[in-house]
Image (cartoon, grey):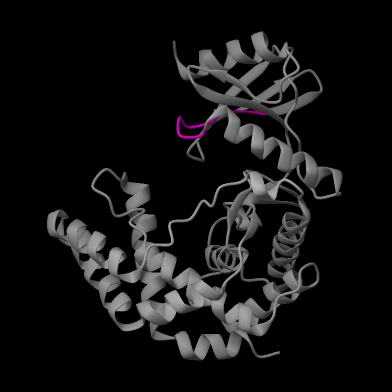
């Protein structure tokens, strides 16, 4: 059975929907647009690594956010009354469609738009801090020491092609120069419930205004890390610090963060960029390899400009 036929069958058997079903190529999960009479939906079949219980946990967080007025959509219960179903061991959800478009990665050069993205990020992080079920979440990060990260990268570089091997050398140089300082900043950072993959593409805009946030999982990680990740995956490469200030001003309109926490967040993000092997493994496809290369280029720039950028990012 094809993926499209499976999705069509699931729409009817689980949700009683019969209409247009077409695949959406973006994303790691299997996503399908569903049009039925006047209603429109997103059917999502998650990857095997996301258990039903994990997606049920996400459903609870999303319901809390929506109840607080955050612009997200809760999962539609199935005909059996369940917000999360399974097929072949994979979690399945149906979500009301949000009209609008996510913005392309590294494309946001307008300060007003960047501020709106910052508002959404700060709003979600503030609500994450208020969520009563936080203790049920397991920490989603790795928190490898620089020494362990160096060992893993070195082992990878020894068997990788030259393109990956050069990236490994670049990252190892950063870890040798700054690893201890970056790890010290991480030790000072606080954890909280975050989106898990927030950046401009997952903020839906219509007529120039934000109307929704999609793909929320709810992770226990470092909010400061996601703040920096959201900015750098949204802004053009090496954008002026004024663009970050617009993002940060929006964030601070919803969530308190000190300059010291901003500086620590910069280091936490740089350490994660440098030590992760995501996009460097031999099994990575072409798109993932390109993302890994982008992460390496970004890490090199952030390391080289660390003193200047932290000063500019923390200047009112």
* Residue 192 image offset from top left, x and y in percent: 65, 59
Q: Position of residue 60 (x, y in %)?
A: 73, 37
- Position of residue 96 in the picture relative to residue 274 (left or right): right
Q: Does the magenta stretch include residue 287?
A: no
Image quarter hosting the C terminus:
bottom right
Q: In which quarter of the image is residue 157?
A: bottom left
Q: At which x and y percent is residue 57?
A: 65, 37
Q: Is residue 141 above or below residue 306?
A: above
Residue 45 belongs to the span the image colors magenta: yes
Residue farthest to the front? 135
- Give the extent of the magenta segment: 42-50
Q: Quadrant of residue 1?
A: top left
Q: In this view, does 194 lie to the left or right of 292?
A: right
In this view of the protein, which residue sits in the foreground, 86 or 121? 86
Q: Which of 304 and 87 is in front in this view?
A: 87
Q: Can residue 99 be seen in this view?
A: no
- Asked if 53 appears above or below 258 in the picture, the reply is above
> Residue 301 falls in which quadrant of the image?
bottom left
14 relative to 303, above or below:
above
Give the residue at x 60% y 58%. 199
Q: What is the count of numbered marks?
A: 0
Q: Where is residue 115 in the image (x, y as percent from the top left)?
A: 73, 70
Q: Residue at x 35, y 55 (%)?
A: 290
Side of 159 relative to 78 (left or right): left
Residue 83 appears in the rendering: yes
In the image as oriented, which residue stretches furthest toward the left?
158
Query: Residue at image x 26%, y 72%?
Result: 172
């Amino acid at each position: 059975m094809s993926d499209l036929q499976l999705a069509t069958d699931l729409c009817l058997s689980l949700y009683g929907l019969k209409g247009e079903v077409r695949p959406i190529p973006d994303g790691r999960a299997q996503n399908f647009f569903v049009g039925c009479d006047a209603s429109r939906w997103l059917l999502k079949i998650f990857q095997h690594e996301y258990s039903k219980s994990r997606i049920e946990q996400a459903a609870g967080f999303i319901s809390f956010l929506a109840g607080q007025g955050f612009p997200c959509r809760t999962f539609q219960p199935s005909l059996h009354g369940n917000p999360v179903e399974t097929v072949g061991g994979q979690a399945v959800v149906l979500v009301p469609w949000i009209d609008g478009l996510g913005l392309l990665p590294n494309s946001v050069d307008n300060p007003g738009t960047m501020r709106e993205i910052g508002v959404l990020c700060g709003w979600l992080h503030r609500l994450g801090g208020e969520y009563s079920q936080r203790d049920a979440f397991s920490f989603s990060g790795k928190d490898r020491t620089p020494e362990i990260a160096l060992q893993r990268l070195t082992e990878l570089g020894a068997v990788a092609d030259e393109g990956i091997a050069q990236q490994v050398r670049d990252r190892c140089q950063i870890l040798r120069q700054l690893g201890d300082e970056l790890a010290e900043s991480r030790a000072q950072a606080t954890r909280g419930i975050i989106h898990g993959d927030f950046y401009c593409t997952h903020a839906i805009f219509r007529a120039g205004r934000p109307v929704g946030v999609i793909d929320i999982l709810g992770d226990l990680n470092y909010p400061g890390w996601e703040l920096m990740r959201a900015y750098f995956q949204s802004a053009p490469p090496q954008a002026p610090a004024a663009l970050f200030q617009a993002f940060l001003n929006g964030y601070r309109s919803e969530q308190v963060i000190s300059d010291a926490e901003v500086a620590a967040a910069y280091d936490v993000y740089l350490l994660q960029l440098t030590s992760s092997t995501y996009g460097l493994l031999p099994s990575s496809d072409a798109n993932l390899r390109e993302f890994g290369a982008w992460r390496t280029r970004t890490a090199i720039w952030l390391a080289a400009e660390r003193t200047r950028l932290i000063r500019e990012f923390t200047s009112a």
